[in-house]
Image (cartoon, rainbow, N blue to C red):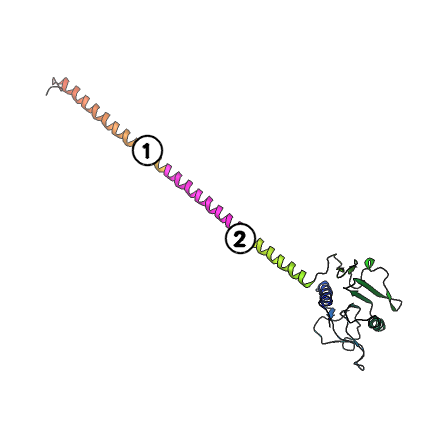
Amino acid sequence: MAESTLQYQWIVTIKEGIAALFAGRDDVFVAADLLWYADRTNKYDVVAPDVLVVFGRPRGHRRSYREWVEEGVVPQVVFEIDSPSNTAAEMERKLAIYDRRGVEEYYYYDPESGRLKGWAREAGALRPIADMEAWASPRLGITFEAPPGKDKLIVRGPDGERFRTFQEVKRQADEERRRRRRAQRQARAERERADAERELRQQADLRAVVQHERAEAERERADAEHRLREEADALVRAERERAERLAALLRTMGVDPDRN
């Protein structure tokens, strides 16, 4: 059980970071602060790593990790985050337990001092890793950067991305959600602008059609008036010509058409 908020933060960060790395695999079990029993006949032979990783066992909830239930599979990777009550003797005892049980990789981090240590199985025993910053976990593919100072550790996944705290993940998720909402608002505004422009173009096209039809009607009216004037002029000319022919006829008959 975590004894400080800083220890708890690192337990959650490492556990969830590793779980995210293997989210696509059903045969990797990752747990935090889970009792690990090795011998079903001895309930006192128990240890609770801050984080344990087991390859070859299904994901899922457990009340404890019991090797005889898990087909004898031993957690391959464990992490311990230093707590205020830890003593050097306690950490040596845990190292001995993990060595005896067959752990392949063991990592210890003290977030208060910034001290990071690691052990890897070699020639049948856990042996210290000489340079943690040049080390990549064979099982997990993660790397470590441990600059001096409190709470400075950086754990990176195989893709180089840093493990983030829950708060950082939440902030990132919130920012991504805000970004999507901004993008959605922008897209909606763009659609509305495009719709408005399309409506304006349709209105302009309609006005152009109306103006064209009005112009055609004006031309037809003008043509009709022109034809009426021509017809009226033709009638006047015809009437004048008829009157002139009648007058000429009367003159041939000796009648003066101009006399009243």
Residue at the image point whose x is 26% and y is 27% from the top: 233
Q: Report the amino acid beneath label 2.
A: Arg
Between label 1 and label 2, give the one nearer the viewer.
2
| x and y, in percent, of residue 50 in the image | 76, 70
Judge by depth and name the residue closer to the eye, 88 or 65. 88
Residue at the image point whose x is 35% and y is 38% from the top: 217
Q: Is residue 113 magenta?
A: no
* Main secondary structure type of the part rendered in magenta: helix
Q: Quadrant of residue 207?
A: top left
Q: Is residue 214 magenta?
A: yes
Name the residue that disc number 2 marks: 188
| x and y, in percent, of residue 78 in the image | 79, 68
Residue at the image point whose x is 49% and y is 49% from the top: 195
Disc number placed over residue 222 in the picture, else none: 1
**Element marked by disc 2:** helix
Q: Report the amino acid beneath label 1.
A: Ala
* Distance (Cα) linking label 1 and label 2: 50 Å
Residue at far right of view: 123
Question: What stretch of residues is rendered in magenta?
Answer: 187-215
